[in-house]
Image (spheres, rainbow, N blue to C red):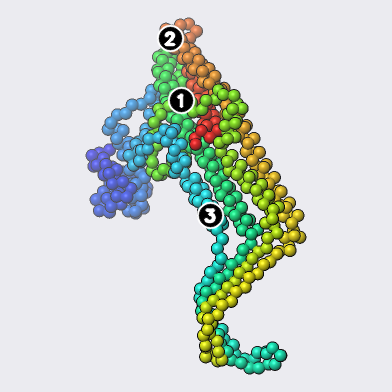
Amino acid sequence: MDHRSRAFVKRCRQFGQFGLPLLLGGCADLELAREMLLPPAAVARASAPQVAREVVRAADATAGGSEESEEPTGSTPHGSPPLSSSSREEEGREASKSIQVPISLETVLRLAEDQNPQLALARARVAEANAACDLAQRWLPDIYIGTGYYRHEGGIQLEDGTLIRSSTGANLNGLDIHGRLNPKEIAFQRISAQRKVLQQKGELSKLTNENLLDAANTYLDLLTVRTGEAIARDMLKDLEDLANQAEKRAEAEPAARVEIARVRAEIAGRQQNIRKLRAQGEAAGAKLIYLLGLDSCSLLVPVDEEIIPVNLVDATPPVCELIDRAMAGGPGIEELQGMVNLVEDAIARSKGPVRFMPSVELRMTEGAFGAGPGSVLDYENRWDMALVFRWNLTDLATRHDRQRVADAQRQQAHLAYHDLRTKLTAGVRESRESILSGVEEIQLGKEQIKHARSARQLAKERVEKNIPGSSVSEVLLSLQSLAMAQLGHLNAIREYDRAQLRLMLLIGCQK
């Protein structure tokens, strides 16, 4: 690439996609752009806007190639390209535009509870239910103030049946109070409002528990991916050294060239694995940003360099003690217990004296009343009141059906409460067993890694000393064995931490 082309590419990168059409608008470098970045067959038929779009897509690739040609970069042996150099450049550009947010497990738990959008919506519903419950606790009559005008023209019947023609008008200005008091209806509205509050609080408790667990597990997944990627890179370095040894050995023993192909295949597999782990890390980071309610341009920077066993709860006490703690403060226990008590109290009240109380209606009107023939109105103060007591006989006819409905609701509340207790019990048992088993698995994993490293070192020494019977494949197998041991140890730590988090949430330690 000549000096003129290199300068143009540099300007393309400086202006970016939005400034490039302005750069081409002056037509100073349009021909250069056509010749340098478009195929010859497309130059003749491409318009200026098309050239701009093609330059936008091609400028980064060309600029990247020019930089690589000007500044030599490291490459892996055997002619293989550097691992995802373009991906590293893209990550660098994205990192410069993103807001770095340091996070730890404690930060994740705090933000997941305070800033998650689903939890914010659930809290708003709880606030709405509390406001409706406060409103249901109060009883006030309907009070109106206004005016009314009545006009009559034509025939009207007197008390004795005589039909006469009349022309009258009336006007009323004043206060109208209308009140209706039904003790059974008021009790039902209050119970319904309280039940709605408990339901929304239970939903909030459920969402909080699920979101905390999901966010913490996602953070653990992110750390696991980062740790796995570091392990894969270390193994990739060992494989590259092994490939050099295989090439040197193949110079003396042509039959050993097959081992070069094996090592290269393993290198390609590890590079693919690293790229896959990076994609999984990006997905975990994006999910965690949503769960924590952070800005979409945030770049999460874990404080922990690698995933390690986290001891949040002491799982050594007897399982019955942990279950009792879960029954006292586990997620949803308080809300469902309140629901059961509310249903029982409502059924007890429905069988009390309140069922015989009538509904009371009061209507009172007072104001300036005007009346007279035609359009002439004479005004006097007027006061009217009506007080009515009513008993609903239909309630007596449907009493047994309504009792069946209440019994079914009580049974549902008890079954839901029993089901929650059973789930909490099973969750505590499972989490405790996973924690105790995880301690042993982690220790066994350490021993496996120790022996695998020893085997790798011995195999490496055999190849370096050219001991009869040694081979590069022997070292390759030892590296694979070490990678499997490290992967098993990594998964054991992740499952242990997950069990710790779940047990903490089940017994209510986060409160």
Residue 321: x %, y % from top left: 59, 27
User: Label 2 sits on what residue type?
Assistant: Glu
Q: Mark 3 points at which residue?
A: 134
Q: Earlier in the sequence, mark 3 or mark 2?
A: 3
User: Label 1 sits on what residue type?
Assistant: Ile
Q: Name the residue under label 2.
A: 461
Q: Name the residue under label 1.
A: 308
Q: In this view, does 218 lie to the left or right of 325?
A: left
Residue 440: x %, y % from top left: 54, 19
Could you tell me which residue is drawn at 56 percent across and 49 percent down? 197
Q: Nearer the viewer, mark 1 or mark 2?
A: 1
Could you tell me which residue is drawn at 53 percent across and 69 percent down? 143
Q: Earlier in the sequence, mark 1 or mark 2?
A: 1
Q: Is residue 467 above or below residue 168?
A: above
Residue 236: x %, y % from top left: 42, 23
Neighbor class of circle 3 (other Cα within 10 Å; few <14, some 14-19, many 20+) is few
Could you tell me which residue is drawn at 42 percent across and 13 percent down? 249
Whether residue 282 is visible, yes or no, is no
Q: In this view, does 122 lie above or below 283?
A: below
- Secondary structure at badge 1 equals loop
Rounded to the nearest angstrom, the CA distance separating label 3 from label 2 is: 80 Å
Q: Earlier in the sequence, mark 3 or mark 1?
A: 3
Q: Nearer the viewer, mark 3 or mark 1?
A: 3
Could you tell me which residue is drawn at 59 percent across and 76 percent down? 384
- Secondary structure at badge 2 equals helix
Would you identify the image quadrant in which residue 62 lies? top left
Q: In this view, does 179 lie to the left or right of 283?
A: right
Q: Which quarter shows the N terminus?
A: top left
Q: Is residue 502 left or right of residue 101?
A: right
